Image (cartoon, rainbow, N blue to C red):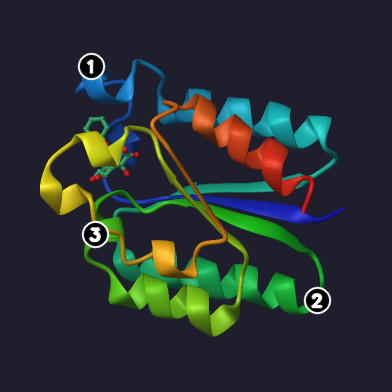
Amino acid sequence: MKTVYVLNGPNLNLLGMREPAIYGSSTLADVQMLCEAACQRHALALEFRQSNHEGELVDWVHEAGRLQAKGELAAVIMNAGAYTHTSVAILDAIKGTGVPLVELHISNVHARESFRHHSYLSAAARAVICGFGVAGYGLAIDAVAQW
Ligand code: CA2
């Protein structure tokens, strides 16, 4: 059984508690349940995590990379939050490990402020999902199950 890493970046622990017009009313615990159900449908194991710390996200990409080296990783699905728009360190971790990445955003970042239009991660992503709300997590898992 291969493992999907679903990694969530800064402030996503606040999901469902603030800014529902942008991010909806589901909490991160709801998103985790959605991901667990999707992984069960596809017989995938799930590692679902959130951190407000850039280095911890880098460490988790490295961890996923070690599974990748053993042929045990399905993909990394990452909502890097604001680090999407700032983090060369996360980009380097993805490139350095070679993990297959789905970059995910709940909102349509292209319809928002211009500083959200650029992503450091897209260059290393196999696919990008944005604007589907939290349903994007399920769509991403359904997609990587076919990889
Ligand atoms: O749309 C997305 O998923 C984002 O990755 C979310 C990030 C934002 O910086 C990106 O540009 C787009 C922000 C995550 C913060 O999430 C919150 C959720 C509820 C309340 C406050 C913050």
* Mark nearer the N terminus (3 vs 1): 1
Q: Residue at x 28, y 32 (%)?
A: 14
The nearer-to-camera label among 3 and 2 is: 3
Graded by Cα atoms within 10 Å as few (under 14), some (14 to 19) or many (20 or more), the crowding at tag 3 reads: some
Dividing the picture into quarters, in which one does residue 100 lie? bottom right
Dividing the picture into quarters, in which one does residue 64 lie? bottom right
Residue to which mark 1 is pinned: 21
Residue to which mark 3 is pinned: 85
Q: Amino acid at mark 2?
A: Lys
Q: Residue at x 22, y 34 (%)?
A: 111
Whether residue 73 sits left or right of residue 58 in the image: it is: right
Tell me if the residue at label 3 has its CB under 8 Å from ligand 1: yes
* Mark nearer the N terminus (3 vs 2): 2
Q: Quadrant of ligand 1?
A: top left
Instruction: Identify the secondary structure beneath mark 1.
Output: helix
- Residue 5's x, y, as percent? 61, 54
